[in-house]
Amino acid sequence: MKKKILVTGGAGYIGSHVIKALGEKGYEILIYDNLSTGYKELVLYGELVIGDIADITVFDRVIEDFKPDAVMHFAASIQVHESVLNPLKYYRNNTINTLNLVELLLKKKIRHFIFSSTAAVYGTPESTEPVSELSLLKPINPYGASKMAVEYMLKDLSPVEKDFNYISLRYFNVAGADQEGRIGQKYHEATHLITRCLKAAKAEISRLEIYGTDYSTPDGTCIRDYIHVDDIAEAHIVALEYLFKKSINDIFNCGYGHGYSVREVVKTAKEVTGVDFPVEEAGRRAGDPPYLVADNTKIREELGWKPKHDDLSYIVKTAWNWEKKL
Ligand code: UFG
């Protein structure tokens, strides 16, 4: 019998790549998405139900009818800057909605839960070593705090709800797109570095601004761990399969374990696109840690995750193929 997976936010960027991976594996999928930042056309497999997780009565009925074996929860608000301006939106959409969802799963005796967390829970790491899952959690914005609150909630729940198991995946800088260009990132307003480089290459924005060149890093710009979205999707598959086999409650970083500076990303984007787009050195953006790289030992050793696309050119190339089609 095919296992049934319910995916909230499955019409979004990361969710849609996970749907593709689940579909290719033959899972039966139901997507629940309010399409606030998702798009129908990104959903390659499964049935899409348009609805909001805040609408708990409708969601209750959807779960009752579908009877999932596991739930993957992507639906969330994810803009750091917006979270600073409107923190309550983040605590409502990310923390309270997840609490209500988990309560519903307990009521319906659904035992497997995968939660989308973020490297933003680490805030500004004190050293330039890759951060492990045991590093101090010190979010510096409401987005990170709203996700950290859920992690604490799940951890506190585990000793009392022994039949309920979860894995939280902490994403680092997710980028890139489907190799065949079927799906990719499609945001109303692009804020991420790689996407903005590509918009500059398309002359959709006049120039790429580098936010801060005086950081204590080798070239003065911030370093991030860019991970291809299909490798993130694969992390969800291994996590899900592990949850079906073992009763664990755990947290894993999702990154490659090494990073690139903003200048290195800009250079790669120029090479891949063949466009020498204008670049301007600007001031620092508030809340940017200088260095944020995952220690990925745990997910590799414990879940057997093997990334396939640890290659910045490939990441930018797939994103560029997609971007040209938009
Ligand atoms: N940057 C620029 N110019 C731009 C856009 C970004 O210089 O036009 C820089 C940023 O200052 C940063 C780096 O590029 O140093 C990466 O920025 P992104 O906006 O692409 O990504 P973030 O590192 O800010 O965001 C990621 C995740 C968030 C998470 C955060 C934690 O996308 O979900 O890391 O720090 F919260």
Image: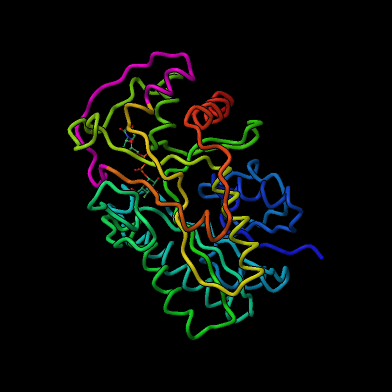
Who is closer to the viewer here, 214 or 257? 257
Colour mode of the rendering = rainbow
Question: What's drawn in magenta, residue-wise?
Answer: 266-290
Which of the 4 image quarters holds residue 284?
top left
- Give 82 or 224, whichever is nearer the viewer: 224
Residue depicted at x 25% and y 51%? 124
Looking at the image, which is closer to me, 170 or 98? 170
Front position in the image: 260 or 18: 260
Q: Position of residue 256 (x, y in %)?
A: 46, 44
Q: Is residue 215 above or below residue 244?
A: above
Residue 17 drawn in magenta: no
Residue at 39%, 41% (x, y): give it. 258
> Looking at the image, which residue is at 23% across and 36% down?
217
List x then y, in percent, for residue 170.
Answer: 44, 56
Ligand 1 quarter of the rendering: top left
The quarter of the image holding the C terminus is: top right
In the rendered image, which quarter contains the N terminus? bottom right
Taking 221 as reference, is 167 left or right?
Answer: right
Residue at the far front: name it: 301
Query: Residue most toward the bottom?
Result: 160
> Does residue 316 appear to the left or right of 163 in the view shown?
left
As drawn, the residue found furthest toward the right would be: 1
Does the stretch in magenta take in 288? yes
- Position of residue 182 relative to residue 317, above or below, is below
Residue 208 spot, x, y in % from top left: 33, 25
Residue 89's x, y, as percent?
Answer: 37, 59
